[in-house]
Amino acid sequence: MAPPPIPDTAIYWLRNDLRFHDNETLTRALEAHDRVLLVYIVNPRELRELPQLGFRKMGVHRAAFLLAALKDFRRQAKALGTDVAIIVPSPSDRGNTEGFIAGKIKELVASLSARAVYTQREIMTEELEDERAVEEALGSEDVPLIRVWGKSLYHPEELPFPAAEIPEPFREFRRAVEKQAIREEFEPPKALPPIDGFAYPATPTLTDLGYENNAAPAYPGGERAGLDRLRYYLEESHLVQRYRSTRNRSLGPDYSTKFSPYLALGCLSPRRIHTAIKAYQSTHKKGAGNNVLFEMRWRDYFLCLGVKYGSRLFRPGGFKERKHEWVKAPDLFQRWVEGRTGLPFVDAHMRELQQTGFMSNRGRVNCSSFLTRDYKIDWRWGAAWFENRLLDYEVCANWFNWHTQALEIYYTSAPWQGLKYDKRGEYVKTWLPELQNLPAPLLHAPWKMAEEGMLDGSDFDLKRDYYHPGIENSKWDWAWTRLKTGDSSSPKRKRKKTTPR
Ligand code: FAD
């Protein structure tokens, strides 16, 4: 009797695409092959400590969020009839940033006689290096690496320009794309053929990845949590209708969508968000959620800038090659990291980031501006710390936003923004309990209160209980006059150039 035919097998190398809904890569692999092995390989590069900075690229919160997403993906894969191979570099493999992934994929291809490897296409330097290494390793086996696009709202083929020739600034991009059609979603698979006899390793723990502490990320990880959040923000709470007026706040989970952590790992497809918003508009309120889609175009814009500028982004002067002398001051950097700068609106956000892995957009703008414009510290240090911390870390979104704050737009004054966006001091008091008894909005400049004798006779001692900024900025003096009157109205237009944002 002839032996049973060897099934035509493909490997799906998962990266930032941990979802079954709207997954073109998986759809194409399943259409072309009898069975598909799902593989996630933890990248040793993410576990490496950055030489000058002494912390890993991926911090513990982000790692915990990733593991939660993998657990969820694996549970769903099992319900569909298969499983996910999650491969972890051993401590001795962690230095092998060049060849670990390629070597593992090559082994899997050989052991399953796989005919092709599929992956979601990435954009930036290190991710492309990984792809090149895999391609090289597969070259000798004559197996193709098939890269499929899946990260953005607009498919690059639908853009009215090649991604590498994207118009700038954002306004031009937005005008060019906002009338473009957005592709239909791909259906999730109903079942997945098993890979019989394959020995799937156990899902790793944080300890397996070399993290000593546990972490409780601000949001639950995984595709199902992402879809739940989408449902909650639209159909259940109708928060989407208030997004425009709340999006600049910082306190609690509901002032903005919190889609970003799920988008970053691909647990939520941008097209699914678009579909859900359009459905909401037709059943509830015309136009609701258009501002969310507006912000999501920023995400696409930065992805396209990534294609355009590639590794030029990471230069000290960025892709614009600005001439800039950055200060290398590890002590000040550490004060910023730990939320000890003496500027409450910065410190509260930095402590939230440190403890939860999340920070509002308002916080990110203020903290990045402070580090680069007040401390004048290399923007790439700050971007690296955000990379370590943020649950929603995405290479283009993070590094291009940092680039914008450090090298492109104007200064953001933290005491002024504290007055504007946290007038009652509720956010600051949540993360800086030591300021609990200071009056708002004055608490946004405690050193000014001390200078003017406002703390005399109180229990609060600036040096003992909090910090003095140790630096000066005339824009803070202007903010102080406003903090004293409580007037948070924006300065008149003609004064805009000389007054802080
Ligand atoms: P919402 O306000 O609800 O916005 C909806 C979606 O629009 C977001 O989920 C996000 O996908 C997109 N979006 C909104 N603003 C931006 C923006 N400025 N740039 C790109 N996309 C945007 N966003 C990330 O996703 N990953 C990052 O690593 C990241 N790093 C940042 C670093 C700095 C210094 C700054 C200033 C911003 C950064 N952002 C980053 C952008 C923005 O702060 C976050 O997308 C947003 O705070 C996420 O919360 P949300 O999902 O509730 O956003």
Image (cartoon, rainbow, N blue to C red):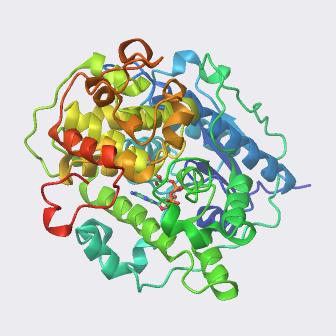
Q: Kindly give the residue lying farthest to the front in the view shown.
A: 457
Q: Say which residue appears at 18% left-offset and 30% top-offset.
A: 472
x, y percentage for residue 256? 55, 58
Q: Is residue 160 visible?
A: no
- Residue 392 seen in the current view: yes
What residue is shown at x 48% (from left), y 42% (from top)?
A: 425
Quarter of the figure with the C terminus: bottom left
Which residue is nearer to you in this view: 107 or 161?
A: 161
Q: Specify whether 478 is left or right of 436.
A: left
x 20%, y 22%: residue: 328
Total numbered badges shown on the rendered structure = 0
Using the image as rendered, state which of residue 171 and residue 432 is in the foreground: 432
Q: Quadrant of ligand 1?
A: bottom left
Residue 232 in the image: x percent, y percent?
72, 63
| Image quarter of residue 56 | top left
Residue 255's place in the image compared with 444, above or below, is below
Q: Please, is residue 419 above or below residue 111 in the view?
A: below
Q: Residue furthest left?
A: 323
Q: Left of 316 or right of it: where is 141?
A: right
Image position, residue 377 (x, y; %): 22, 30
Instruction: Name the residue nearer the viewer: 123 or 412.
Output: 412
